[in-house]
């Protein structure tokens, strides 16, 4: 599995911890920035990561900002991205099983490092169930197509 990770300045420290965690599990990843805690704009990083996941260059993506909200909204503007903001293990599992989320959003100012690592593990290990959920995910794609410009 190829994973891409990105953050703004508000998620930079948590991103660094998640990168160490991915390395400890030998998970292949690429860091799309930011590379310091200097102020930057989260939409730039949500868009860049979203494009990389939607293009198929990466299987999954992880985005992080202070709350996870802004960067997940930005990533979700890219057709084909299903970014899920998860601050608990149940939501992480359900976002994969039911929604086939391909981007995980986290908020550094919302959760601690250890919980974030647990969420990342569950999210990366959980497979999409398909079945009745396939129809619903298909409807999400149809909405994207309806509003594509």
Image (tube, rainbow, N blue to C red):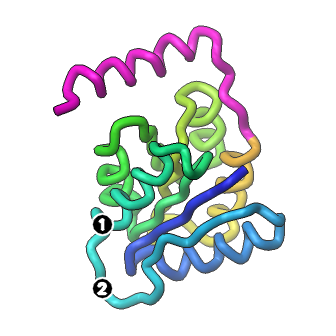
Looking at the picture, tell me which residue is in the foreground, 2 or 117: 2
Identify which residue is drawn at 30% across, 66% down. 44
Residue 31 picture location, percent across and down: 55, 72
Quickly name the residue at label 1: 44
Q: Quadrant of residue 125?
A: top right
Identify which residue is drawn at 39% across, 70% down. 66
On screen, residue 13 above or below 29:
below
On screen, residue 74 above or below 27:
above
Identify which residue is drawn at 58% across, 9% down. 132
Label 1: which secondary element: helix
Label 2: which secondary element: loop
Identify which residue is drawn at 45% across, 38% down. 82
The answer to whether residue 62 is left or right of residue 139 is: right
Q: Residues within 10 Å of mark 1 (few under 14, many from 20)?
A: some
Quickly name the residue at label 2: 39
On screen, residue 111 above or below 72:
below
Range drawn in magenta: 126-149
Q: Would you say residue 22 sits in the magenta stretch?
A: no
Q: Residues within 10 Å of mark 2 (few under 14, many from 20)?
A: few
Residue 67 picture location, percent across and down: 39, 63
Q: Quadrant of the C terminus?
A: top left
Q: Would you say residue 132 sits in the magenta stretch?
A: yes
Residue 98 picture location, percent across and down: 58, 25
What is the chief secondary structure element of the magenta stretch? helix
* Badge 1 or badge 2: first in the primary sequence: 2
């Amino acid at each position: 599995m190829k994973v891409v990770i990105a953050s703004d300045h508000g998620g930079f420290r948590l991103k660094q911890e998640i990168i160490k965690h991915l390395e400890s599990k030998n998970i292949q990843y690429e860091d799309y920035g930011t590379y310091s805690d200097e102020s930057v704009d989260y939409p730039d990083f949500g868009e860049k990561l979203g494009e990389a996941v939607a293009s198929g260059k990466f299987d999954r993506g992880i985005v992080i900002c202070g709350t996870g909200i802004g960067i997940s909204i930005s990533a979700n503007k890219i057709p084909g991205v299903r970014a899920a903001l998860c601050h608990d293990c149940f939501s992480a599992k359900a976002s994969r099983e039911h929604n086939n989320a391909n981007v995980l959003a986290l908020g550094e100012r919302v959760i601690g490092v250890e919980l974030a690592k647990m969420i990342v593990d569950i999210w990366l290990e959980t497979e999409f169930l398909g079945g009745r959920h396939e129809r619903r995910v298909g409807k999400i794609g149809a909405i994207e197509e309806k509003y594509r410009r």
